[in-house]
Image: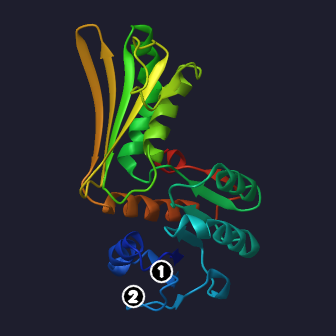
């Protein structure tokens, strides 16, 4: 049995994970944390994680970016592994996660879905072949109108997968509106679309001479991220201190 503290339990992702785990016999939420307080979730809810005195095997955090530092400190203090799913983190917060992972197991990925992480592996394998064959690389991501950060962390992670395969020789370009010039071969364009209720669409486009290859991922429900976080928690139970990603989960 894996026992979970669900941070951000009253949010959309917290409630989705709660519903998914209602009938799961191998993993259970033993406590929740949410500033809104108690909800009809079947487990105790604390307004502040520092008040949570329930023992657990792992924390899943889908809370606010503002609360991430407090969650990290709690994880280290209580030696509870952390699946950090909050998006839009600053460079300082990401560095804080890296430092904390020297003391406790922490898993952080830009995207928790199985499909995206498989796509990252594929991109690392094929990018060199296509780039050496004079294919240009562009990424287009689409999300709902409420998303605050742009481009998405997933788009940047996909770009990094391509760029790492090319010895980081590409330069990310986010806006061409102020420049009138031909596209440079070392550009990697990243475009963001915001509108409606789009859960998450990502296209990685390799455009060559007379042919185009597009790798696409469509998330039709946030359940794909919830299920990924659950699998990450299963994986992280009992792991030694270290920084882990979903690539470690899928093997």
Q: Secondary structure at mark 2?
A: loop
In the image: residue 243, left or right of residue 21: right
Q: Locate residue 80: give its quadrant.
A: bottom right
Asked whether the beta carbons under mark 2 and mark 1 sit within 8 Å of each other, the answer is yes
The image's mark for residue 246 is: none
Query: SS for tag 1?
Result: strand
Q: Residues within 10 Å of mark 2 (few under 14, many from 20)?
A: some
The image quadrant that residue 16 belongs to is: bottom left
Horizontal side of residue 107 vs 134, given as left or right = right
Q: In the figure, 118 relative to 177: above or below? A: below
Would you name the residue on which mark 1 appears? 29
Which x, y percent locates residue 67?
A: 60, 70
Q: Is residue 193 visible?
A: yes
Q: Is residue 192 left or right of residue 64?
A: left
Q: Position of residue 150 (x, y in %)?
A: 44, 46
Q: Residue at x 59, y 67 (%)?
A: 66
From the top left corner, tell me how far across and down residue 85 is, in percent. 51, 60
User: Residue tagged by mark 2?
Assistant: 41
Residue 35, above or below 195: below
Q: Is residue 237 visible?
A: no
**N-terminal label among 2 and 1:** 1
In the foreground, 147 or 106: 147
Give neighbour class at mark 1: few <14, some 14-19, many 20+ (Cα, 10 Å): many
Question: Whole-percent x and y of residue 211?
Answer: 23, 13
């Amino acid at each position: 049995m894996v026992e979970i503290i669900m941070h951000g339990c009253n949010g959309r992702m917290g409630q989705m994970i709660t519903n998914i785990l209602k009938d799961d016999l191998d993993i259970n939420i033993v406590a929740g944390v949410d500033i809104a307080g108690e909800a009809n979730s079947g487990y105790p809810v604390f307004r502040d994680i520092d008040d949570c005195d329930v023992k657990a095997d792992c924390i899943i955090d889908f809370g606010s970016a503002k609360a991430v530092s407090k969650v990290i400190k709690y994880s280290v203090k209580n030696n509870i592994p952390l699946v950090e799913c909050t998006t839009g983190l600053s460079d300082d917060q990401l560095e804080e996660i890296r430092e904390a992972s020297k003391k406790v197991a922490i898993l952080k990925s830009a995207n928790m879905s199985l499909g995206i992480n498989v796509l990252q592996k594929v991109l690392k394998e094929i990018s060199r072949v296509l780039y050496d064959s004079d294919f240009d690389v562009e990424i287009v991501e689409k999300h709902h109108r409420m998303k605050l950060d742009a481009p998405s962390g997933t788009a940047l992670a996909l770009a990094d997968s391509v760029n790492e395969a090319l010895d980081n020789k590409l330069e990310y370009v986010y806006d061409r509106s102020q420049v009138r010039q031909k596209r440079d071969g070392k550009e990697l364009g990243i475009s963001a679309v915001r509108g409606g209720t789009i859960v998450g669409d990502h296209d990685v486009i390799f455009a060559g001479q007379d042919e185009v290859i597009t790798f696409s991922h469509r998330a039709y429900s946030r359940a794909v991220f919830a299920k990924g976080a659950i699998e990450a928690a299963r994986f992280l139970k009992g792991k030694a201190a270290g920084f882990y990603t979903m690539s470690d989960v899928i093997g």
